[in-house]
Structures are given as structure tokens and as C-alpha cells.
Image (cartoon, helix red, strand yellow):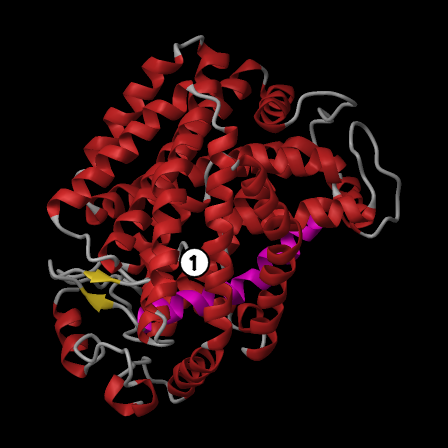
């Protein structure tokens, strides 16, 4: 079984998905007229002006923070360090490129999730890739496979991985027993998780901006303290990406190493195209009342995750000179880099950052799994309680176990779900294009974009007309 899983991962993550995710991002960038560059201001406008919600959904800002909670995990601290060690400074350049083209993919999949969302039996908005696979492509079997893979990977295994990182960081920094850390982490997560997605959203909208803001502030302080070294560091990133200078320190180096590791890190970090973030994007009450508005919000999330947070880690490490031949990598390297700049307090700061990044990632990952349960018709109290208890049990288990084998299984599950999602969104690219044209057509007329399903008979199949009506929009405005 392990040989089979490793074989699947090799094919998917070393070949198929590297080219598939990157190629899809380039495809949507071209088809949508580079909207992530030309209309970046629209992302900010939509996010800052969106305050609406109703009893069925969460706010667009809450949806953004929950998706960031999942995206911005311990990988933003440890994964970036590994990419730098294996690929050199040039890996950061390719990480940026992947994020920038990935914004178009993130926009597309979340726009589709909004269009094909439904109102569940408990009166809440639910949706995501499984729903547009079933409702738009008439492929419910693909939705079932996608949902199962998502629940296994995000709802169970990845929460164990985050717990493991937190427990190791606390053991190393403070000497705390891993089991105690795991139990405490599960208890804290239970308080939020048993409140459901809306409680997770309320928690995330407070904690995620705070944790990301403090981490970015640390990066800014480090840059200011080392401002004279910044030009040379930026040159090393560009030069390393194109082989204009030799790799230094403990870096494996080389153009191919830089490209491969930067692309992989970027794809793993921002999750664009993997079909995870659309699950929470669909839960939001959009403002403006148009599917594209939530697409813009999630595209901005891709930007924040990689261009801001992951880059902050890269700056922290590159300006420290902490990369050594046969030296530490991963989380240890990030902590060593912080210690160079701030002394031992820097090492403790990273340990605390790991807790917040990892803990919110656990909550974000669980929220995706709960949403997937709706598609499988398992939104009743008993199935949801079983999922919650399973998630919490994995938090405790992950804190004390080596999770490498199980993590490989989760990688395979996530690879399968990403492959299915990429095929689906490319097949539905025409729908994304029409929605985008409709949105900007209204913006050019100085109108607040509003999507009404009855005006688009070509979308009648699979779209819940009770969600996209003038009346619903008016009701939403009354709840602002």
C-alpha cells in the first residue's frame, strides 16, 4: 500500500499537478485578461466595502479569514525554509510567479462555487467544487470522490500534521510534553469547532488578521534593521531564478532546483486550483450580489498567503545568513533566523507564531470538511458530531506520532481532488468568462454588480434561483 501511495504522489506532485496547476493558472490569466493584475484594486474595493451577511451565510471578510486560516499554516514557516535550502533564493521568485498566476485560478474556482451554491437543510449556504461538478457538469460521482478526499485530507490528516508541528515547537522551545500539548490543543479547538462554521468564521476574523499582521510587522522590522542588505538580497532572488549567479551557503541551487522548489512551495502554500478555499467561499453572502465578487476576495487571499506571509519568512531567513551547508532546515531554520535578528526572543516568537498559524489552520481545514459533508447528505447532527470527534482525536494523535506515512496518504488524496477540480474548472471556464464580463459590464455603467439567475438562461441548469434573485439581494441589504 505504501509503495502504491508513494507512486501516486510521485506521478501527481512531481509531474501532473506541477504542470496542471501552473498551466491552469496561465490559461485563466490569459482567458480573463489578466484580471488579477489589471483589476487588483477591485479585489481591495470588494473586500473593504463588503459588510453584508444574512442568517444563511457569513460575511466575505469572514470567508477570506477562514480560507487564510487554512492556507497560512505551519508550511508558511517551515515549507519556505525547505524551498530556500533546496532551491536557493531563486525559489522565492518562482513562488511569486506561481502565486500571481494562481490568483486567476483562485478567482475562477471560488466564482463557480458561489454560482452553484445551495441552501442546505438547516438553512445555511453550502457549496464548493463537489456542487459545481454535480450541478453544472452532471458528474455527481466526481463530487463524491472529491468530497471524500477532502474530508480525509483536510478534515483528518492535515489537522494531525499541524498538531504535530505545534507540539514539536513547544517541546523544543519550552520543554512541554507533546501529549499535554495535544490535549490542550484539542480542547481549545473543540470550543470553536462545536460551534460550527459560523463560530469558526467569527473566531477567524479576529485572530487571523492579528496573527498575520504581527508576523508581517516582524518582517518589516527585520527589513528596516537590514535595509542596506536588501538590494543585494533582491538581486540574489532574481539572479538565482535565472542562474545569473552561483548558489551559496548550504543551498543545493541551480535554475531547475530553484524553479521546481519555488513552484512546489507556491502551489502548496496558496492552494489555488486545489478546490479547498471554494468550500468556504460558497458559504459567504456576496456583496456585491454577484458570484464574481467572492472570486475577487479569494484571489486576494492567494496574494496575502504567498506574496505577503510566505515572503515574510523568506526575508527573515535570507537576511539572517542562517542557511548553512548540512545545517538545519524547515522550522528549525526559521527559528534560527529569527534568533539571529532578535535573539532568543525571536525563537520563542516563532514558536508562538506556529501555534496561531497551526491552530487556525486546524479550524479552517475542519470547516472545509464539514461543508463537504453536506454534499454527501451527511449534515445531520450525528455524522457531524462524529466528524468533529474524529478531527479532535487526530489533533491529539498527531501531537505524539510521526505522521509521515499518513501524510503521504493525505497528499495522494489531495492530489486526486486537485486533479478532478482542475478538469472541472477548465470545462467550466466559459461560465467564468461570462460571469466576469457581466460583472465588469455593470461596473463600467457605474452600477453595483448584481447577478440575477433568471437573466441568464444558459446557467439555469444547476443554479439555485432562490439564491440569485432581486428579492434575496434586498433582504441581504436589510441585514447590513
151 to the left or right of 165: left
Magenta span includes 110: yes
Q: Left or right: where does residue 106 sit relative to residue 48?
A: right
Residue 158: x and y, percent? 42, 37
Q: Residue 476's x, y, as percent?
A: 17, 70
Q: Is residue 94 magenta?
A: yes
Q: What is the x, y in percent for residue 235? A: 79, 46
Q: Residue at x 23, y 37 (%)?
A: 388
Q: Secondary structure at mark 1?
A: loop
- Which image quarter: residue 424? bottom left
From the viewer's perspective, tell me whether residue 254 is left or right of residue 209. right
Q: Quadrant of residue 440?
A: bottom left
Which secondary structure class fits the magenta region best? helix
In the rendered image of this protein, does residue 299 appear above or below residue 245?
A: below
Q: Position of residue 302 (x, y in %)?
A: 49, 55
Q: Nearer the viewer, residue 156 or 64?
A: 156
What residue did someone put label 1 on? 275
Instruction: Decide if residue 223 is in sight here.
Output: no
* Quadrant that contains the C terminus: bottom left
Read off the magenta span: 92-115
Amino acid at each position: 500500500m505504501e509503495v502504491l501511495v508513494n507512486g501516486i504522489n510521485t506521478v501527481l506532485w512531481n509531474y501532473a499537478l506541477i504542470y496542471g496547476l501552473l498551466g491552469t493558472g496561465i490559461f485563466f490569466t490569459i482567458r480573463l485578461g489578466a484580471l488579477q493584475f489589471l483589476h487588483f484594486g477591485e479585489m481591495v474595493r470588494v473586500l473593504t466595502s463588503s459588510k453584508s451577511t444574512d442568517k444563511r451565510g457569513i460575511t466575505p471578510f469572514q470567508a477570506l479569514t477562514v480560507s487564510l486560516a487554512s492556507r497560512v499554516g505551519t508550511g508558511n514557516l517551515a515549507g519556505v525554509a525547505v524551498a530556500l535550502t533546496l532551491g536557493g533564493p531563486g525559489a522565492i521568485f518562482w513562488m511569486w510567479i506561481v502565486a500571481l498566476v494562481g490568483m486567476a485560478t483562485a478567482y475562477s474556482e471560488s466564482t463557480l462555487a458561489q454560482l452553484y451554491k445551495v441552501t442546505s437543510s438547516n438553512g445555511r449556504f453550502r457549496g464548493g467544487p463537489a456542487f459545481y461538478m454535480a450541478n453544472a457538469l452532471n458528474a455527481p460521482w466526481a463530487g463524491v470522490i472529491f468530497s471524500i478526499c477532502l474530508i480525509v485530507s483536510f478534515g483528518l490528516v492535515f489537522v494531525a500534521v499541524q498538531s504535530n508541528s505545534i507540539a514539536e515547537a513547544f517541546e523544543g522551545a519550552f520543554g512541554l510534553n507533546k501529549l499535554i500539548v495535544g490535549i490542550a490543543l484539542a480542547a481549545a479547538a473543540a470550543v470553536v469547532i462545536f460551534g460550527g462554521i459560523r463560530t469558526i468564521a467569527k473566531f477567524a476574523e479576529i485572530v487571523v488578521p492579528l496573527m498575520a499582521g504581527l508576523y508581517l510587522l516582524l518582517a518589516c522590522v527585520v527589513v528596516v534593521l537590514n535595509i542596506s542588505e536588501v538590494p543585494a538580497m533582491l538581486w540574489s532572488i532574481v539572479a538565482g531564478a535565472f542562474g545569473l549567479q552561483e548558489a551559496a551557503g548550504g543551498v543545493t541551487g541551480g535554475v531547475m532546483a530553484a524553479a521546481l522548489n519555488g513552484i512546489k512551495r507556491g502551489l502548496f502554500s496558496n492552494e489555488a486550483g486545489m478546490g479547498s478555499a471554494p468550500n468556504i467561499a460558497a458559504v459567504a453572502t456576496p456583496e456585491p450580489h454577484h458570484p464574481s465578487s467572492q472570486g475577487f476576495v479569494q484571489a486576494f487571499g492567494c496574494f496575502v498567503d504567498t506574496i505577503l506571509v510566505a515572503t515574510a519568512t523568506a526575508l527573515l531567513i535570507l537576511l539572517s545568513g542562517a542557511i548553512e551547508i548540512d545545517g538545519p532546515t524547515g522550522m528549525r531554520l526559521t527559528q534560527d533566523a529569527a534568533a539571529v535578528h532578535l535573539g532568543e526572543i525571536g525563537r520563542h516568537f516563532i514558536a508562538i507564531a506556529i501555534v496561531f498559524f497551526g491552530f487556525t489552520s486546524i479550524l479552517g481545514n475542519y470547516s472545509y470538511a464539514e461543508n463537504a459533508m453536506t454534499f454527501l447528505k451527511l449534515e445531520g447532527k450525528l455524522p457531524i458530531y462524529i466528524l468533529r470527534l474524529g478531527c479532535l482525536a487526530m489533533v491529539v494523535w498527531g501531537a505524539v506520532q510521526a505522521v509521515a506515512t499518513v501524510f503521504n496518504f493525505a497528499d495522494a488524496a489531495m492530489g486526486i481532488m486537485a486533479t478532478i477540480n482542475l478538469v472541472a474548472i477548465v470545462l467550466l471556464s466559459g461560465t467564468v468568462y461570462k460571469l466576469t464580463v457581466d460583472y465588469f459590464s455593470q461596473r463600467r455603467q457605474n452600477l453595483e454588480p448584481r447577478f440575477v439567475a433568471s437573466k441568464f438562461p444558459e446557467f439555469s441548469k444547476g443554479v439555485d434561483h432562490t439564491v440569485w434573485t432581486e428579492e434575496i439581494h434586498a433582504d441581504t441589504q436589510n441585514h447590513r
